[in-house]
Amino acid sequence: MRVLIADLVTELNPVYEDSKRLVVPFVYEGERETDIVLKVSEEYLDDLCRRAAPGVTRSQLENFAFSTAFNRRAIPFGTMLVHSSALIYDGGAYLFSADSGVGKSFHTRLWLQAFGGAVHIMNDDKPVVRLYDGKAVAYGTPFDGGSGIALNESFPLRAIVFIERGEQNSVRVPSNREVLQKLYFQTAHIVSAKTAESMLENFDKLLSLTKFYVLTCNMDISAAKTAFDAIIRNE
């Protein structure tokens, strides 16, 4: 089966339900050559199952394995995973990124409460950003992190927002050094030396093509309004 992810023709043959279901909107029937081939062996899934947390299914692990493989192999194509919840507003993508457990998905759901149909979530865990022709574009992927939100959409990237928890809501602009440190841990960073060079080139380009913010926030709906005012209203 061939699918189109971030405009990259990708070949994969899922066995289990999660990936089979999620790739359907991404199926590609055109004549372009394949850019990326993804293979996940049953032996590798056996290993993941031995190390997985209780309750994680083999089907979910297959989707995770395809995601990991794609996000590493896409790097030389100017494409990078940003572990985030991709919020869409007024034709642009805003990626809210955080370490697992901090609450990036909870925060973007506050936006749904605050702004209703004016916003939606394109992917709740594993969108990618592709850099080409002097622009940065955010893409949905068929990799959902368990949320079920994995739309086949793409939008110009407007900003990447790193979330930190705090009692008071505030937004600040981080230094380039801080951005690079945070990006490194929110992307596919366990790669070969050769791929690491491409990854660093992608980071450098991304710094010049989009805006970055650090959002310190609580879990109240006012956090979404603070972020909107600082990041979107003042664009």
Image: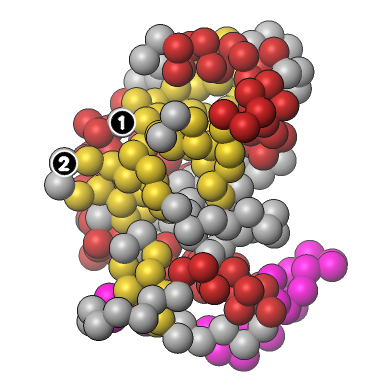
Residue 7: percent from the left, percent from the top?
A: 31, 63
Label 1 element class: loop
Instruction: Find out whether residue 91 is within the magenta segment.
Output: no
Q: Quarter of the image containing the C terminus?
A: top left
Give the quarter of the image for residue 205: top left
Relative height, residue 106 to residue 4 (above, below): above
Q: Distance between the residues labelled 1 and 2?
A: 11 Å
Q: How is the image coloured?
A: secondary structure
Q: Which residue lies furthest to the right in this view?
A: 54
Image point (84%, 67%), residue name: 54
Give neighbour class at mark 1: few <14, some 14-19, many 20+ (Cα, 10 Å). Answer: some
Give the extent of the magenta segment. Answer: 34-60
Image point (48%, 58%), residue name: 152
* Residue type for callout 2: Gly
Give the quarter of the image for residue 181: top left
Give neighbour class at mark 2: few <14, some 14-19, many 20+ (Cα, 10 Å). Answer: few
Image point (52%, 10%), residue name: 229
Name the residue carrying label 2: 134
Residue 218: percent from the left, percent from the top?
A: 72, 18
| Residue placed most toward the observer, 100 or 134 | 134
Q: Quarter of the image containing the N terminus?
A: bottom left
Image point (68%, 9%), residue name: 168
| Residue placed most toward the observer, 225 or 89 | 89
Label 2 element class: loop
Q: Which residue lies furthest to the bottom in this view?
A: 42
Relative height, residue 222 to residue 98 (above, below): above
Name the residue carrying label 1: 210
| Between discs 1 and 2, the one toward the N terminus | 2
Q: Do the residues labelled 1 and 2 touch (CB within 8 Å)?
A: no
